[in-house]
Amino acid sequence: MNPEALAELGASVLSTDADVTAAYAHDESRLTGRSTPVAVLAPASTAEVAACLRVATREGWHVIPRGAGSGLSGAANGAGEFVVLSTHRLDSISSIDPVERIAVVQPGVVTGDLRAAVAAQGLFYPPDPGSVAFSTIGGNVATNAGGMCCVKYGVTGDFVLGLEVVLADGRVMRTGRRTAKGVAGYDLTHLFVGSEGTLGVVTEITVRLLPAPRPPLTLVATFRSLTDAGQAVAAIAATGSPVSMLEIMDRTTLEAVDRLARMGFEPGTAAMLLVQSDEPDSAGVLAEVEKLCAGAGAVDVAVGDDPEEGAQLLEARRLALPALERLGDWLLDDVCVPRGRIVELIELIEGVAADEGLTIGVFGHAGDGNMHPTVIFDDADPHSREAALRAFDRITEHALALGGTITGEHGVGRLKRSWLARELDETAMAVHRAVRSALDPDGLLNPGNLFDPA
């Protein structure tokens, strides 16, 4: 890269320090290609982002936009010669409007910080990804992140009203609105939501807020078989019960969490459901859920009336991945199937684990069918690594065969780009490429993410 062009961006924005560039070489994904960037750009304003992209376009640099680097699909990884554009200095909550129930934030704001800031004003930002304590709003928008509240509230995109975006050539565009309604023109806002850094760099986000709900009550149900747990999930879904959370953990995950946190789960428990309700009549909602779980053969059902106890149980669910990580190297999948087919998916995953001689723990969002099979393997052993990759592909294939999708919330990135063309038809892929070409004709933004440039 042209040293003079790099220097043009200024020391406050540009770093070529070896320690800094090494820290930006990859996200938290496993078994994805990665390289060290030539430089890291850290603009602190929309104007600086635009200047960075104008220089990049002029010089033909590949640019990898990056939030906190907590992604699990390789979308923040680059290849060859490239620069990383980090949004960590764009970290201000510009405004919170309790009348209109909106907040305007920059992409580097940590999701948990936004939730806390609006809660202090009696408001609620529902998206709650597992990485809520360290992922950023910009990254959540880039992947259309979900989380444990999706069963009631939806995903990040359901709360994004408008964006400020810098296109690849440095032009700045505003999309969407700050009003309760608005249908003027194409919905460009949601074109960028989930685009994984391939269409532009988001520099400001307007999000919709809700009134703060009541502290949730929590129900825990354990089952001797996955079939029984699946029947309970199907029954809860069929009744339209307004639960705000419906999570599942399988035997492998429960045992791992118990070893880590000493939660006291009964030995031999095949599955556990964690259910919450934040309705005004949460006790009534969970009483109905309790009946449904008992009818499906639950071994034990407990309803807590203490929000603090519920928070502790929720923490056990958040420990699922950290607990499984302790078993060895890991490869986390993210697939979504119809809720009625969750048990089929888990049973197929158990078959994959047996065939490949691997441990695979399954946990996830039973309320919307989004599962996170976690393959445990030994990265130092080529045979184990190959088995993990086969297992990952077989699980993804099973999800498609069950009428599901290759990713529910983590995104395609580089990890699953070969699968995108298998889920989408030929025309849909052509439209994807056409949109990409229209906004970034030189393919400079995150090349190799989502799909290889034509």
Image (cartoon, helix red, strand yellow):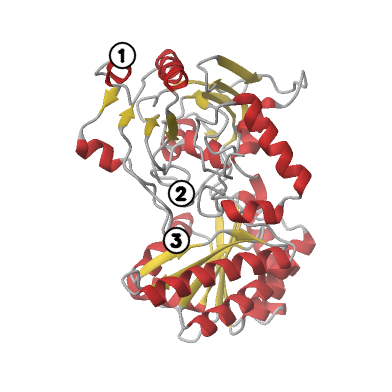
N-terminal-most mark, 1 or 3: 1
The residue that label 3 is drawn on is 309
Examine the rendered structure and indicate whether residue 256 appears above or below residue 218: below
Q: Position of residue 30 (x, y in %)?
A: 41, 58
Left/right of residue 244 with respect to residue 319 in the rendered view:
right
Left/right of residue 316 with respect to residue 104 in the rendered view:
left
Query: What is the quadrant of residue 9 in the picture?
Result: top left
Examine the rendered structure and indicate whether residue 144 appears above or below residue 240: above
Left/right of residue 296 with respect to residue 92 in the rendered view:
right
* Quarter of the C terminus within the rendering: top right
Residue type highlighted by circle 2: Gly
Query: What residue is shown at x 35% (from left), y 69% (from top)?
Result: 379
Q: Are marks 1 and 3 in contact (CB under 8 Å)?
A: no
Left/right of residue 421 with respect to residue 112 in the rendered view:
right
User: As rendered, which of 171 and 433 lies closer to the eye?
Assistant: 433
Q: Does residue 263 show up? A: no
The residue that label 1 is drawn on is 8
The residue that label 2 is drawn on is 74
Examine the rendered structure and indicate whether residue 78 appears above or below residue 237: above
N-terminal-most mark, 2 or 3: 2
Measured Cα–Cα span from mark 2 to mark 3: 36 Å
Foreground mark, 2 or 3, reads: 2
Callout 2: 10 Å neighbours few (<14), some, many (20+)?
many
Residue type highlighted by circle 3: Glu
Q: Which element type, helix, strand or loop, lies under badge 2?
A: loop
Residue type highlighted by circle 1: Glu
Query: What residue is shown at x 42% (from left), y 59% (from top)?
Result: 31
Foreground mark, 1 or 3, reads: 1
User: As rendered, which of 367 and 88 lies closer to the eye?
Assistant: 88
Q: Position of residue 89 (x, y in %)?
A: 35, 26
* Quarter of the N terminus within the rendering: top left
